[in-house]
């Protein structure tokens, strides 16, 4: 026997076995961003899935008082809270307004108590991974587990001996809407509807969510509850335990109202497990059942969990990194995980979905998906660029979804939620998002209809324009003055509105040029330069203009940095917006007195704490240094420092609202070594990667035959010494999408 050969073979086998066991999902920490206003949650979800099932801990007990969230009120879960009131279903990730988190399912023991303040429990043993969550409820000795498919949840409860219950509560959630109904289908099945909507306080953005629930054990008892005012003459029907909740034990049909619920009660043995499945649909209960039956074959919790984990493993493995620290890998893959939650699918397994701003039902062709949760003011900056690069088949369907919304409603979405437009934030963000997709080679969608929609929103008079309500002075004067339009709770955001229009019009000019519409291209390009009207040499910043054409006076360019309302700017100060002209950096530099003056002023933003890493307008600022020869090192140093400071593996490891993955996408791109700093323009600015190697799987049909891009580094340090692209020297710090993806390799020598 060749002993040496045997030892080497054994060592190699062990190495390969260890390698096979290592998973990319092991680097994901779903608790990152669950405090410090990050508004993410650790619940179970599949990539871009409709269903998410999340621990709901925003209602408190006498011992642990929290009104919704101790730090923020738009998330079902906050890390500091430790009072579980059930699993909520269909949740938003990283948003700044409360919505959804509906149909809470809660396991308990003993007598049925419908008041969540009483039946809630503190918990220990919390664990989460992609597609799975669990904790132990200390009040009851129950282990609660949850996982998910694309449209359904699977929950498993391990009970102690005695009377055990599963409660289904329609009265709680994050939505500002109320009301719903529940119907008993069989001893082990119920169905119903819960009304949701009014996101960011738009009273018209209301929609129903339908659900179907099935449990694995026939209950000994079951029934409805309904909260109602105490009635005279019926004192005997009320008990201290029930409070103002009336229990219906001799009724088994349908109940409706604002504070309603259903319970199943069992006699369980020690350690007995009962499973619950829920399917959801935004079309009908029939579709919710169809989704459930199609995506879960009987009760098989462990298989559902395994399948969910595998979906995440497959998706996250489209980008493989090596080198760097374990914490950097955790930051990176957690960020990629968060960037793959929204937009999410809307259609049921049969293809049906609710039409946009319409009472009807549509159906997508086989093999396609309709998407929803288009938080476009956020995601047009980087999330859609990430999808275009790594998940082009999904980005294609997302663009088709937006175009479909225009066909159904007459306008592109701005901040769409389950078929309703919420009109949150400002601008015309579908234009740069779709233009970017088109110019990067994804062409399998109706660009003529998209262009028609863009021209409509760019030119329709303001009184009729749902995307640009203050477009009239914008076209006439080249800017929007104060006092012309303010229609929501954020105040008069004239400068912020106009800056978004400039970016949209620049992207529209690029698209028009590509489509051979030269006159249109020139028109929209010229409009995009109107930002120059706002530049004040006195303040050295962009500055609001009054109705009489004068700069606002008095004026403090730092006002608004704490998110207070300030004339002209939305969620920020003049400093947060002054460099927000990504399509004309050199033109802005000229206004500021030249390249050196621009760089000096931009450096001041970081040196004096004027940069806000938690909001969108200035997140591309670090990359603007690289437009100027000899200053590229500032981008590389600044990006590295921001990553270290603001993106960590702790619960507060995202600097603010993740904004449906936007902050996370910033980290993903920055750690890979390039960033799309000008939305709509098919290019990137380069920086130093955080890893020794980054391998991105590509679609060869879109990338000059290349099926992957490998970015590797040599040397040490944060700065770039030299670059080789496809084996040849590359002497620039900005690069086109076509050149980057078509090269196959990029080597960055660090110093």
Image: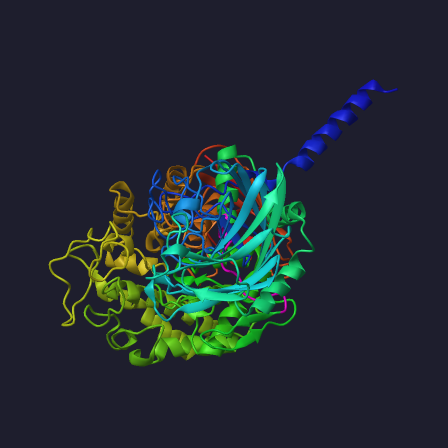
Q: Does residue 575 appear to the left or right of 124 in the view shown?
A: left
- Whether 56 is drawn above or below 361: the answer is above
Stretch of the chain drawn in magenta = 338-350
Vertically, is 700 above or below 131?
below
Name the residue at 27% across, 58% down: 590
**Residue 458 visible, this orientation:** yes
State the image coordinates of residue 739 (x, y, percent, origin top left).
54, 56
Is 47 drawn above or below residue 10 in the view shown?
A: below
Query: Up-down: is 744 above or below 439?
Result: above
Residue at 18%, 70% in the rendered image? 483
Q: How many marks?
A: 0
Q: How is the image coloured?
A: rainbow
Q: Which of the two residues, 491 or 597, is positioned nearer the viewer here? A: 491
The image quarter in which residue 397 lies: bottom right
**38 left or right of 324 in image:** left
Image coords of residue 610 (percent x, y)? 26, 46
Residue at the outermost left position:
554
Query: Which quadrant of the structure image shows residue 7?
Result: top right
Residue 346, magenta (yes or no): yes
Residue occupying image coordinates x 36% and y 58%: 582
The quarter of the image holding the C terminus is top left
Spot the residue most to the right. 1
Does the magenta portion include 532? no
Q: Nearer the viewer, residue 568 or 35?
A: 35
Name the one closer to the observer, 416 or 681.
416
Residue 560: where, in percent of width, then height?
A: 22, 53
- Residue 363: x percent and y percent? 59, 73
User: What predominant SS class does the magenta segment belong to?
Assistant: loop
Instruction: Say which quadrant the N terminus sits in.
Output: top right
Query: In this orientation, does residue 129 appear?
Result: no
Horizontal placement of 695 versus 95: left or right?
Answer: right
């Amino acid at each position: 026997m060749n002993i040496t050969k045997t030892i080497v073979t054994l060592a190699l086998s062990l190495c390969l076995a260890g390698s096979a066991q290592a998973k990319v999902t092991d680097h994901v920490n779903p608790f990152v961003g669950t405090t410090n206003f990050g508004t993410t949650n650790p619940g179970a979800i599949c990539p871009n899935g409709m269903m998410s099932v999340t621990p709901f801990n925003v209602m408190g007990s006498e011992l642990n008082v929290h009104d919704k969230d101790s730090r923020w009120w738009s998330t079902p879960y906050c890390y500091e809270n430790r009072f579980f009131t059930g699993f909520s279903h269909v949740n938003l990730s990283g948003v700044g307004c409360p919505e959804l988190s509906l149909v809470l399912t809660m396991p308990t023991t003993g007598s049925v108590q419908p008041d969540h303040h009483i039946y809630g429990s503190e918990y220990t043993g919390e664990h989460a991974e992609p597609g799975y969550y669990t904790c132990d409820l200390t009040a009851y000795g129950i282990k609660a587990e949850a996982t998910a498919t694309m449209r359904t949840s699977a929950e498993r409860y391990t009970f102690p001996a005695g009377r055990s219950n599963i409660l289904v509560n329609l009265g709680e959630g994050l939505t500002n809407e109320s009301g719903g109904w529940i119907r008993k289908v069989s001893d082990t099945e119920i169905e119903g509807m819960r009304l949701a909507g009014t996101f960011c306080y738009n009273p018209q953005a209301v929609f129903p969510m339908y659900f179907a629930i099935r449990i694995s054990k026939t209950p000994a008892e079951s029934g409805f509850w309904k909260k109602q005012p105490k009635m005279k003459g019926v004192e005997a029907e009320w008990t201290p335990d029930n409070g103002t909740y009336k229990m219906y034990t001799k009724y088994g049909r349908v109940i409706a109202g604002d504070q309603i619920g259903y319970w199943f009660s069992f006699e369980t043995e020690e350690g007995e497990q009962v499973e619950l499945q829920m399917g959801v649909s935004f079309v009908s209960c029939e579709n919710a059942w169809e989704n459930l039956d199609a995506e879960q074959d009987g009760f098989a919790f462990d298989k559902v969990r395994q399948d969910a984990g595998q979906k995440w493993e497959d998706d996250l493995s489209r980008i493989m990194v090596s080198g760097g620290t374990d914490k950097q890998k955790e930051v990176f893959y957690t960020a990629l995980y968060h960037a793959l939650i929204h937009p999410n699918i809307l259609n049921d397994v049969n293809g049906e979905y609710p039409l946009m701003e319409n009472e009807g039902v549509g159906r997508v062709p086989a093999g396609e998906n309709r998407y929803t949760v288009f938080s476009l003011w956020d995601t047009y900056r980087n999330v859609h660029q990430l999808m275009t690069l790594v998940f082009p088949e999904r980005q294609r369907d997302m663009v088709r979804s937006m175009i479909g919304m225009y066909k159904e409603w007459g306008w592109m979405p701005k901040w769409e939620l389950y078929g309703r437009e919420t009109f949150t934030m400002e601008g015309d963000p579908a234009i740069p998002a779709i233009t970017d997709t088109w110019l990067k080679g994804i062409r399998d969608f109706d660009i003529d209809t998209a262009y028609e929609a863009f021209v409509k929103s760019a030119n329709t008079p303001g009184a009729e324009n749902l995307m640009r309500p203050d477009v009239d002075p914008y076209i006439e004067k080249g800017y929007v003055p104060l006092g012309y339009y303010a229609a929501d709770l954020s105040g008069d955001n004239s400068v912020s509105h106009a800056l978004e229009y400039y970016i949209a019009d620049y992207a529209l000019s690029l698209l028009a040029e590509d489509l051979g519409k030269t006159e249109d291209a020139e028109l929209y390009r010229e409009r995009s330069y109107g930002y120059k009207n706002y530049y004040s040499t006195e303040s050295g910043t962009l500055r609001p203009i009054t109705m009489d054409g004068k700069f606002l006076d008095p004026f403090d360019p730092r006002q608004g940095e704490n998110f207070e309302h300030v004339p002209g700017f939305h969620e920020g100060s003049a400093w947060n917006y002054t460099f927000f002209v990504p399509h004309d950096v050199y033109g802005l530099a000229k206004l500021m007195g030249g390249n050196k003056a621009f760089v000096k002023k931009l450096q001041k933003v970081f040196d004096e704490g004027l940069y806000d890493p938690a909001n969108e307008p200035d997140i591309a600022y670090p990359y603007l240094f690289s437009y100027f020869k000899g200053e590229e090192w500032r981008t590389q140093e600044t990006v590295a420092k921001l990553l270290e400071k603001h993106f960590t593996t702790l619960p507060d490891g995202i600097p603010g609202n993740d904004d449906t993955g936007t902050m996370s996408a910033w980290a993903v791109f920055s750690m890979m070594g390039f960033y799309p700093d000008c939305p709509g323009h098919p290019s990137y600015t380069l920086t130093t990667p955080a890893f020794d190697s980054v391998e991105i799987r590509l679609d060869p049909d879109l990338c000059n035959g290349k099926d992957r891009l490998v970015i590797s580094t040599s040397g040490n340090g944060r700065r770039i010494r030299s670059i080789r692209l496809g084996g040849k020297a590359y002497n620039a710090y900005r690069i086109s999408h076509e050149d980057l993806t078509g090269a196959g390799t990029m080597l960055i020598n660090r110093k």
